[in-house]
Image (spheres, rainbow, N blue to C red):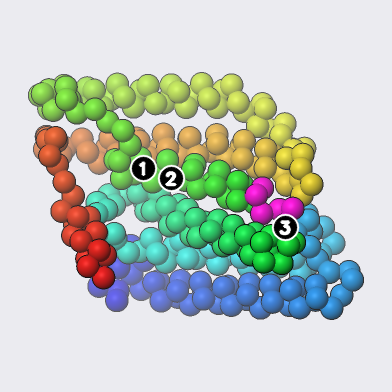
Amino acid sequence: MESDSLWLGALRKPVKLLMFGFIGLTTLIYMWLVFNRILSADAIGMHEMIRPEGRPLVTVMLLSFSAAVLFAGLYFSDFQGAIEPAPTGPMDIFSLVIARIAMIMVAFIVLVMFYEVVSRYVFSRPTLWANELSLWIAAFVFLMAGQYAMQQRSHIRIYVIYDMMPRWLQKTSDVLSLALLLFFTFALVWGGYGDAETRFLRMETFGTAWDPPIPGIVKPAILILIVLVAIQAISNLIADWHKLPEHHGPDEIDEVEIENIRKTLEK
């Protein structure tokens, strides 16, 4: 319903249709690749999936899969979770999209590991790629989770002294915390940019049998995500600047989450 839309509005239905369309296209191409692998000696394996030169069908599948994940992230970011605060600006929306993509990627880690367990212990044919692929996906989930944690203000904070401060001193502490984060971001990018650029340009690989370019992709992603976290922190400071003081007691409990756990246990 558009009235319940968080930010897409009238675009929610087209985004949903595009999501299902790309999911369907990806599934069809994947089924064809599986069928072709059974019948053909020149079948496409996982090595070609990460190095699709001269394999246009693989390129189409990877682009379709990426589009499916992107539109899924856009679509599910239009729903507000029961314990999520309402977004306050474009950066919050962007972080929610990133978070939804990370949640989808967790499901893919489970699927990859399930495939490996079945292949290894049922058919006695362990894969060469499942462990590296799960590590590759998990690295991005970890980085994206940091972006989401910053947007939700759920990173570790110590309120014992903060709650005792007057509001003007709380704002000063917030500015100081942001300044330290920006300094850390600058130092990390300054010190790691050259190494990340070198690894990315040569697409450095992992050195295993499958040999995916995990270092060449993850190292630049670390710098990009830390910059996004810093931008989100700036957005948080602007959004929270005129808020009334908040106090956090030792017995603070999220009643919504407790109720959800109770309903789950009753089932």
Q: Is residue 145 above or below residue 195?
A: below
Sequence-first tag of 3 and 1: 3
Residue type at mark 3? Answer: Pro
- The x and y percentages for residue 49 are 74, 59
Q: Is residue 175 above or below residue 35?
A: above
Q: Which mark is residue 26?
A: none
Please report the bounds of the magenta region as a residue range: 126-132
User: Closest to the observer: 242 or 162?
Assistant: 162
For image coordinates 42% across by 52% down, the residue present is 99
User: Closest to the observer: 100 or 191?
Assistant: 100
At mark 2, the secondary structure is helix
Q: Is residue 160 above or below residue 266?
A: above
Q: Which mark is residue 149?
A: 1
Residue that numbered label 2 is attached to: 145
Name the side, left or right, on which 43 lies relative to 217: right
For the residues bearing labels 1 and 2, Cβ distance under 8 angstroms: yes
The quadrant of the rendering that contains the C terminus is bottom left
Residue that numbered label 3 is attached to: 126
At mark 3, the secondary structure is loop
